[in-house]
Amino acid sequence: MSFFIKQMITAKLKQLTPSELLTYGKQYGFSITHDEAVSIANYLQTHSVDPFTENGRQSMLQALAKRTNTETAKKAHKLFRELITTYGLDHLFE
């Protein structure tokens, strides 16, 4: 089952659109511009990201910080950890 969940999460990251990112930003208190959302979506679609390992998450967050700013990347990391815990998915993430 965990393999299936990991595939779903990875697929969703690759399919995120700029408009979805802007909506999530508003929903979770992030401030990103349309250009930043486009850059993030392009990165996720063109790079293989592994959010399930610490190295993969750090790499993804560094790319986010380059496209937005360090504060936004820190907020995203905190939110990501909260969502993992809230949904009981800790066991999937190293």
Image: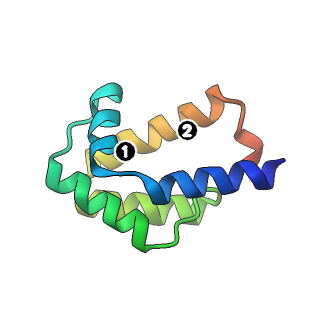
Relative to residue 38, is residue 46 depicted above or below? below
> Any mark on residue 81, and which?
2
Task: Name the residue at 51% across, 40% down.
Answer: 80
Residue 69: x, y in percent? 22, 53
x, y percent for residue 5: 72, 48
Lateral position of residue 6 relative to residue 49, left or right: right
Which residue sits at x=56%, y=32%? Answer: 83
Label 2 vs 1, first from the N-terminus? 1
Q: Using the rendered view, name the quadrant where residue 29 is placed.
A: top left
In the rendered image, residue 43, in percent from the top left (x then y), is placed at 36, 67
The three-letter code of the residue at mark 2 reads Arg
**Relative horizontal placement of residue 5, taking residue 64 as reference (left or right):** right
Q: Which residue is mark 1?
A: 74
What x and y, as percent, mark residue 11? Answer: 57, 57
The residue depicted at 52 percent of the width and 51 percent of the height is 12
Residue 6 versus residue 31: which sits nearer the camera?
6
Relative to 29, say whether 43 is above or below.
below
**Which residue is depicted at the point 72% across and 31% down?**
88
Q: Amino acid at mark 1?
A: Lys
Quadrant placement of the C terminus: bottom right
Q: Is residue 82 left or right of residue 85?
A: left
Q: Tag 1: Cα neighbours inside 10 Å, few (<14), some, or many (≥20)?
A: some
Side of 38 where 35 appears, left or right: left
